[in-house]
Image (cartoon, rainbow, N blue to C red):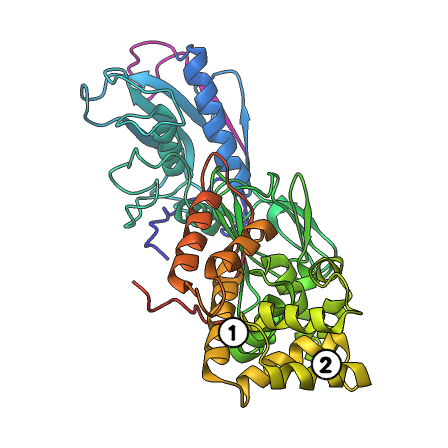
């Protein structure tokens, strides 16, 4: 955590530690203890940004700001004043009260001044040198009792970094240390439905079946599941920031709901278990796995399903039927499995052996793919094992590491990889990286779903 300077007062009433309460504020229309005033605060465009700044602080801390008609006794008054000329001090916050005799709740009024000499930028989406909205956020932070932080990545840094367009995780943490989180961000042991706010948050759902309402479409969002079970939701294109969640059962987007219970056990898998499942997934469908599908089956494996059981379930899929169109044609079936799993035609002895076992019922068609994998890894030729390993690496990199899920792209990856005679692992990886770059595009992104610390990145040593 950054070093937050918390002043020795908080807005509210009663003993120290009680959360804020209602605080009235106004646009100053007359001079005050510190105001000399260049003009009254009447400009609608500036007033709009001030209101939005108050709403921003209101949303992340347990304090309620209410705009009132101006009076010299109002708690927060905001006005224009001549301070020090252009490009100097942009704004100041001055306190009045009996601080020396009652340090905890002695501040009874605050006056925030903005320098009339500045040429202010009113566009919240740009990052100019002088941004009125971010200056207002900064000064309200002081009025709340937040001093300067030592972290230049936060809005409350001493130099008022104007390339920061809103509150950061550090600013929110400082305000919540002072006032606590607002009630709507406090989960209980029962079922809760909480709207995630802009900026970074860390929330624990505690007990019950809890829904975190992300409030935007899935495209442009990355969701990661850590080995610890922590869920991290990143809004890549908007103001949602990064939310770190625990004990949350559902993520609700505007266009979909993600049931996190369907993936709650997969973090229990070892690296080798996860890799074996990805290996079978790639072999069955001859494509890089879609992240959500792979994670679903990883959860089933962690919950006690055997690889044989999952193999049978894989075979009973429409996608599998489309690949192996006539399982009753044993010759064609064995040939297709060899091509998809090992990237080659079957050798004569292997072809005869497996045809006989399938015909006699010693091996089901569902288990056949798994048997070919086992044979390649245990006693098969080194080229078969290497081919299958490389194919699995690409599948893991595509889904678990990069979080991609487009099945068409997944098939293209394996087509790029080729068979044992044309294998192009680095070319296929480069294609995955290109798909990922497209996926994180601001203009045409897609939903990404990753695991972190569950399975090793097979390309971690590549430059």
Residue 123 at what x, y percent from top left? 38, 22
Would you say residue 32 sits in the magenta stretch?
Answer: yes
The C terminus sits in image quarter: bottom left
Please give left or right for residue 175 compared with residue 164 in the image. Answer: right
Residue 30 at what x, y percent from top left? 38, 12
Q: Is residue 24 above or below residue 427?
A: above
Label located before the other in sequence (2 or 1): 2
The N terminus sits in image quarter: bottom left
Of residue 130 and residue 188, the one placed in the foreground of this image is 130
Report the mark closest to the observer, 2 or 1: 2
Q: Residue at the bottom extreme?
A: 379
Is there any visible trace of residue 210 in the rendered image?
yes
Q: Residue at x 77, y 79 (%)?
A: 364
Would you say residue 219 sits in the magenta stretch?
Answer: no
What's the CA distance linking mark 2 and mark 1?
Answer: 22 Å
Circle 1 residues within 10 Å: few <14, some 14–19, many ≥20: many
Of residue 422 and residue 401, the one placed in the foreground of this image is 422
Is there any visible trace of residue 306 in the rendered image?
no
Q: Residue at x 44, y 27 (%)?
A: 76
| Element type at mark 2 | helix
Q: Which residue is mark 1?
A: 388
Q: Which residue is mark 2?
A: 355
| Element type at mark 1 | helix
Of residue 345 and residue 178, the one placed in the foreground of this image is 345
Of residue 454 and residue 279, the one placed in the foreground of this image is 279
Q: Is residue 272 above or below residue 189?
A: below
Instruction: Point out the stretch of residues depicted in magenta.
Output: 22-40
Where, by quadrant of the figure, is residue 191 drawn?
bottom right
Please give left or right for residue 317 compared with residue 441 in the image. Answer: right
């Amino acid at each position: 955590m950054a070093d937050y300077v918390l002043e020795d007062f908080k807005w509210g009433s009663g003993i120290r530690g009680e959360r804020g309460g209602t605080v009235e504020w106004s646009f100053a229309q007359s001079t005050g203890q510190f105001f000399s005033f260049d003009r009254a605060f009447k400009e609608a465009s500036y007033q709009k940004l001030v209101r939005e700044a108050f709403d921003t602080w209101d949303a992340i801390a347990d304090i309620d700001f209410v705009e009132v008609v101006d009076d010299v006794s109002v708690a927060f008054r905001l006005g224009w004043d001549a301070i020090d000329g252009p490009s100097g001090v942009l704004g100041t916050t001055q306190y009045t009260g009996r601080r020396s005799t009652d340090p905890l709740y002695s501040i009874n009024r605050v006056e925030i001044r903005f320098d009339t000499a500045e040429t202010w930028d009113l566009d919240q989406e740009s990052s100019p040198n002088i941004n009125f909205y971010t200056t207002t956020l900064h000064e309200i932070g002081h009025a709340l009792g937040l001093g300067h932080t030592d972290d230049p990545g936060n809005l409350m840094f001493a130099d008022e970094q104007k390339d920061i367009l809103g509150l950061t995780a550090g600013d929110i943490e400082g305000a919540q240390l002072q006032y606590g989180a607002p009630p709507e961000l406090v989960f209980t042991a029962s079922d809760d439905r909480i709207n995630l706010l802009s900026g970074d948050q860390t929330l624990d759902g505690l007990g019950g079946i809890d829904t975190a309402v992300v409030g935007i479409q899935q495209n442009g969002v990355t969701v990661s599941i850590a080995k610890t079970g922590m869920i991290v939701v990143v809004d890549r294109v908007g103001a949602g920031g990064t939310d770190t969640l625990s004990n949350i059962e559902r993520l609700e987007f505007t266009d979909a709901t993600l049931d996190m219970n369907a993936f709650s056990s997969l973090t229990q898998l070892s690296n080798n278990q996860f890799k074996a499942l990805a290996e079978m997934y790639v072999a069955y469908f001859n494509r890089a796995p879609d992240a959500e599908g792979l994670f679903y089956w990883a959860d089933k494996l962690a919950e006690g399903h055997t690889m044989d059981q999952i193999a049978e379930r894989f075979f009973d899929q429409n996608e599998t039927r489309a690949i192996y169109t006539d399982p009753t044609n044993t010759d064609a079936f064995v040939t297709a499995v060899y091509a998809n799993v090992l990237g080659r035609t079957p050798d004569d002895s292997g072809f005869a052996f497996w045809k006989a076992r399938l015909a006699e019922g010693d091996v089901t068609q569902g288990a056949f793919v798994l048997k070919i994998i086992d044979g390649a890894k245990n006693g098969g030729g080194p080229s078969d094992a290497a081919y299958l390993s490389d194919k699995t690496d690409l599948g893991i990199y595509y889904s678990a590491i990069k979080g991609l899920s487009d099945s068409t792209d997944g098939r293209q990856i394996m087509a790029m990889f080729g068979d044992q005679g044309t294998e192009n692992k680095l070319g296929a990886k480069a294609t995955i990286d290109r798909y990922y770059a497209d996926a994180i595009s601001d203009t045409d992104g897609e939903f990404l779903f990753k695991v972190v610390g569950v399975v090793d990145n097979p390309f971690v040593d590549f430059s």
